[in-house]
Image (cartoon, helix red, strand yellow):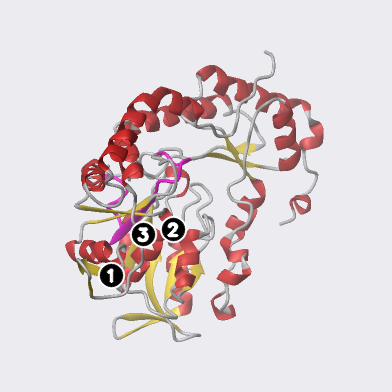
Amino acid sequence: MNNKKINFFDLSRQWSETKNNLTEKINSVLDSQSYIGGKFIETFETNFSKYLNVKHAISCNSGTDALLMALDVIGMKKNEIVLTTPFSFIASSSEILALEGHAVFIDIDDKTYNIDTNKIEIWINNECELKNNNLIHKNTGYRVAGILPVDIFGQCADYKKIKEIAQKYNLWIIQDSCQAVGSLDEDGIMAGNHGDITCFSFYPTKNLGAFGDGGACTTNDPILAEKLLRYRNHGRKNHYNYIEHGINSRLDGIQAAILDEKLKLLNSLNDRRCEIASIYSKELANINFIQLPKEINGKHVYHQYCIKLNNINREELMSSLSSMGVGTNIYYPKGLNLIDFLNKEPRLKTECPISDNLTQTILALPIWPELTNEEVLYICEKFKEVINNKIDLKIESVSQLNI
């Protein structure tokens, strides 16, 4: 088979397949001049909440803003602690810092790469005490306020256990489902319903992607929904009636119209991602030097398909695949627990060896839904060819991984 050119991610085919409908939708917004607020926003929010089977969906400017809004509206205060994962995009922790809180990083499960609920309990038991129904970190005196799990790569975290912990210690839950729209937990409950507030991103590469930035918060709590609505619009209750602090974070009409149209395709696009993942998992199953993704907590929607390399030189592997036309990527090259500005309080520093190892050994393969089966099989063929023929990819000692 001659070398092909397969980008790690490509939107051109999706655009070709959808541009007639999407252009019509965009033109309808331009004709109406309903650019901020109005019917296009209302229609998308209604349809998005119906899709997720959640009571309230509040759109905003980005997934990062969704996290900021959720943390501020939930009532996180200065110096409060939020338990979260080190293995994530930076926004899941940077917005805790933005509100002068502290992210405490709990290491991840070595199969799902989501936050390890057993390690949450171990940290609480070792580091905290209950005082007047508040969980207090013994060494700093800071209150532990909540848990912010991330549904990494498209798979729900273990919310059954997370909710038990939250109820036991009077903690709120903010669910970061920016990578997991359409995923289900083991009980068939859709992402968007597991936290007091759930956050979504509509960045163009996401499973449900806009043509720019976009995000949303969802909740089943009407009081939180009202607060989120005000917060995204300068704290305004109604016309020029400002009653609290807020920000300017409004999804525009064009993005809402695009998202509403693409929402109709989301199930089929997610199903196609699952089909591609199934091909990868079948074709790469017998390779000794890799660990394939595990689908454990319900339906995985494969925002990314990431494998773990064992004693393989990742950079050499990526270079060899690139020379054969196969694009790859790394999510994530550095854990959040190793970023200095996110770890300002040394008394809250934690060790995250599984995350640290994974940042040095993980590799993402292309999984955009417009890939053909032939292309996916080509990727698998070239991957196996490199692994089998390039003996220099094998690393003699773990020390060469720089971990």
Which stretch is magenta? 189-207
Q: Sort mark 3 into few (<14), some (14-19) or many (20+) by Cα contacts within 10 Å.
A: many
Find disc 1 in the rendering and name its residue. Answer: 235
Measured as percent of width and height from the top left, residue 312 is found at: 72, 40
Q: Secondary structure at mark 3?
A: loop
Q: Secondary structure at mark 2?
A: helix
Tell me the tag on residue 367: none
Which of discs 2 and 1 lies nearer the camera? The answer is 1
Measured as percent of width and height from the top left, residue 123 is found at: 47, 71
Q: Report the predominant secondary structure element of the magenta stretch.
A: loop
Q: Marks 2 and 1, how far apart in space?
A: 18 Å
Find disc 3 in the rendering and name its residue. Answer: 249
Find disc 2 in the rendering and name its residue. Answer: 64
The residue sitting at 26% across, 52% down in the picture is 37
Q: Where is 234 relative to 176, above or below? A: below
The residue sitting at 61% across, 25% down in the picture is 379
Viewer-closest of 133 and 211: 211
Of callouts 2 and 3, the N-terminal one: 2
